[in-house]
Amino acid sequence: MSMRWYVARRLGWAAFATFVILSFYFALIQLAPGGGEAAFLFSAATEGGDVQQAEQTYRQIRGLTGPLHERYIDYIVNMATGDWGWSQTRNQEVLTAISIAYPYSLQYALPATIVSIVFGTGVGLYSATHRYTKTDYAGTFISFFGISIPNFWFGIMLILVLAVQAPEVSLFGLQLLPLPVYYQTDVVLNHGWVSWENFRQLVMPIIVLSTAQIAGQMRYSRATAMEYVNAEFVKTARAKGASDWRVLLRHIFRPALIPLMTIFIAQILGLFFAGAYLVEVIFQIPGLAKLSYDALIAQDTPLFMGTSLIPILLLLLGNLIQDISYTVLDPRIDYGDR
């Protein structure tokens, strides 16, 4: 009962925080200068349309007509019912534009996240149990390399090495090198999402995105696991003859999983908004991040607000999932008095 009451209160708090955030976004929309109005009116004038009628239409689309309190109520109701506004640069609803761009982000964010969680956690645990060995030093070098190297520079270098300067290499009739320089949406239309041709143009974005994630995951896993390597219950397990794998997975990884859950959930929720702005801009992937970037450049306020609102809402959801997952992984945690 106490757990249900705690979850109910957290849901109520998340709803209140969402309401505050939406109110803040409403203020930003009202105060945003221009917002593409000049471009809209210029387009109407060059096409021979009525400028005054175009201005009125624009203000209706943006929800800038009527008293302020009525606009605020309409805005809250529209956001709650899934009407996030109209993108004048794409000439479609904001949620429609987001739903079209989302698969392009997911197709490289999903494998990059899986690789970073599995590989980063595995190497981090292994380094913690084999400290000051050659493999530990190699893992430390990889992690510092991934943390230190800028994604935009790494992406450009990969394009030069694997796409521009690489010789032609084929294996069993499949072309391995050179890789495509930029992402081509025609490949998906002609060969489908799950195809070798589409995979080839995702190799470099996956490498760039997963490199930084692996580095962070590896360092965090190593530091967390080291707290339990010399614990009394681990020494007892070794004294009883437990194998290295059993000690690692059952007696070190299991207690370390609770703090690691924080970064796991953050990475999984990141799939719903792959905020890899630089990756998508460099490789010209028409995903969510590039959609947000293009909206910012074109002063498409509703579209930019919609794409930037998603990670904030996911942050509220992530905090709630983390707190609940702690109680599932460690029954000693009790929220009854909170």
Image (cartoon, grey):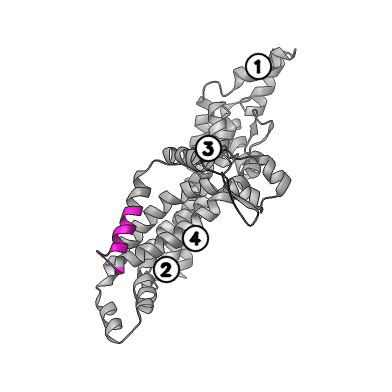
Of circles 1 and 3, the one toward us is: 3
The CA distance from mark 4 to mark 2 is 15 Å
Task: Report how far apart the C-alphas of labels 1 and 4 lie in the structure.
Answer: 48 Å
Q: CA distance from mark 1 to mark 2?
A: 56 Å
Residue 61 shown left or right of residue 327 in the figure: right
- Sequence order check, earlier mark of 3 and 4: 4
Magenta part of the protein: which range?
Answer: 129-142
Q: Nearer the viewer, mark 3 or mark 4?
A: 3
Report if residue 103 is visible in the image. Answer: yes
Q: Are marks 1 and 4 in contact (CB under 8 Å)?
A: no
Q: Is residue 140 above or below residue 93?
A: below
Q: Mark 1 = which residue?
A: 41
Q: Which residue is mark 4?
A: 8
Distance from disc 1 to disc 3, alpha carbons, whole Å, reads: 43 Å
Q: Using a 10 Å C-alpha cutoff, classify the residue at mark 1 as few (fewer than 14 neighbours), some (14 to 19) or many (20 or more).
A: many
Give residue 327's mark. Answer: 2
- Quarter holding the C terminus is bottom left
> How much space separates mark 3 and mark 4, taking CA atoms?
56 Å
Q: Earlier in the sequence, mark 1 or mark 2?
A: 1
